[in-house]
Amino acid sequence: MADQDNGPSSEEPQQTSGESIPETPSESVSPTPPSEDQGDQSPPAERPLPDGAVAITDDDGEIPDPNDSGMPQPNRRRRRRRRRRGRGGRGGNGGGRGGGQGGGGGGGQGGGGGQGGGGGQGRSRKDIPVVEGVIEGVLELHPKGYGFLRDPQKNYASQDSDPFVSSSVVERFGLRAGGLIKGEVGPGSKGQGPRLKTIETVDGLTVENYQEVPHFDDLTPITPSEKIRLETGPKPVTMRVMDLLTPIGKGQRALIVAPPRTGKTMLLQDIADSVSANHPELHLMVLLIDERPEEVTEMRRRVKGEVIASSMDREVESHVRIGQLIIERGKRLAEAGHGVFVLLDSITRTARAFNKWVGNTGRTMSGGLDIKALEVPRKMFGTARRFEEGGSLTVVATALIETGSRMDDAIFQEFKGTGNMEMMLSRDLADRRIWPAIDITRSGTRHEENFFTEEEYEYVTMIRRHLITLTPADAMDKLIKMMEKFPSNAEFFEKVRMMM
């Protein structure tokens, strides 16, 4: 993906095969009927602005490529691209890559190669979808200051129909990446793509009120103390065990360390089910990076929350862009006082994607991991926190180990100790079909006393002291059998109290 600023005519954006470009970027679009020439009369498409809405008047300038994320690319890719362009004509104003390797470059508006060329189909201005009406979209900012509204209904994918937001509008109204903007969209000048014409609300607030929302970095992070209850009934017992030994609070930064085939996917699904059932006030977001497509489908069908995925059949650019945008979305909700719960599967594959993206900067760590590859993934994981002023962002991420890859082990070592909850899954327990396959001796939560009453904490301490004398397999097997005798953790605590 080239870094272009010369309008959509300079290069054809890559489209995922089999996907059609919808007429509108969201189901919330209320199409405005096209206006007809009626002499000096005003176009009937104009509508009065709602209370608190603002109109955008700077409609000049060309619209950049909506598929250009602006992220730096390795130098070797740029050199290869220049060599390809040198073999033939570059195509016409809409040709994009069409005439790149053709026999005699394309020339017209439609682009494409000459008679002897094999250039791809060009993209003219007429191919840009017409989008008009009121829409909602999440703002993704380009490093140069402008942005586009991505449709949550379309998995936040970059599309030609995404409305453009100029850098002057972003600066004037203090818009931030990840904000949900509702406004009216109309066609750009000179036959360009859609452009944001008015702003009605940002994250449900008027523009004036939104500018009073404090920035994420200006809020005060504090230690999590409000427990997220995962127990939903006698089963699944996995959630009851987590409530007992590895509790999660609002604002937790949790790391689930998992070897292959230890029940990681089922564990994440159980956590998502418990959060949606017990805490409807939390905005649940499941972020799947480089996962198998069938697991993405299963997660979307089961989880009652927002599932965003960049599966293994997508390019690295998609992994990098989606990962950062979703974390920014969570930050915008948290700074506005909302509770957000993000399940990230996995931080290891996210780091792999960034390692491939940054290329070779000359300094590598163990396993071929570039020294700059983990800068953004560490920031993504580190955004989890609870604010003294209100609002929280909880991140539960998985880390893969024992995969046979030295890079995966190096990634885990870099993230080890950065969270305030760590749960280690055991391959030995999984091979013995002991579920959950949690290694009690290597799992725990910092300041876990904040999530129990004083009496309950004494019971938990006594249980841990007893189980630590056993092997991990025997300890978990015994704990599960004891807990299954009681329908709830409260009754289990009562039994422990009587034994004391």
Image: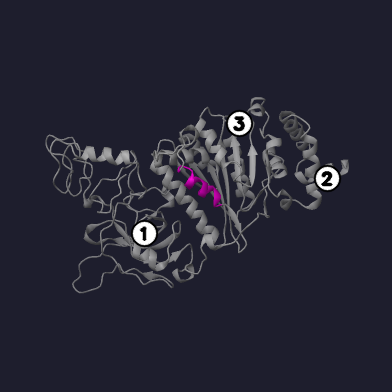
Q: Amino acid at mark 1?
A: Gly
| Mark with earlier residue (1, 2) | 1
- Specify whether residue 330 is painted magenta: no
Mark 3 element type: loop
Q: Is residue 31 left or right of residue 402?
A: left
Bounds of the magenta segment? 372-383
Q: Is residue 213 above or below residue 155?
A: below
Q: Looking at the image, is mark 1 or mark 2 nearer the viewer?
A: 1
Q: Which residue is mark 2?
A: 494
Taking the spot 31% from the left edge, 69% from the top edge, the residue there is 57
Q: Looking at numbered disc 3 in the image, what kind of residue is underneath it?
A: Thr
Point out the image quarter for the N terminus.
top left
Q: Mark 2 against mark 3, which lies toward the viewer?
A: 3
Residue occupying the far top of the picture: 432
The kind of residue tagged 2 is Glu
- Residue 357 pos. (x, y %): 40, 41
Provide the residue designation for mark 3.
262
Disc 1 designates what residue?
A: 145
Mark 3: give few (<14), some (14-19) or many (20+) Cα within 10 Å.
many
User: In x, y percent, where is residue 384?
Assistant: 57, 52
Vertical relation: 137 (above or below) 366: below
Quadrant housing the C terminus: top right
Between residue 497 and residue 383, name the one nearer to us. Answer: 383
Q: Disc 1 versus disc 2: distance between alpha carbons?
A: 59 Å
Q: Is residue 400 left or right of residue 189?
A: right
Q: Earlier in the sequence, mark 1 or mark 3?
A: 1
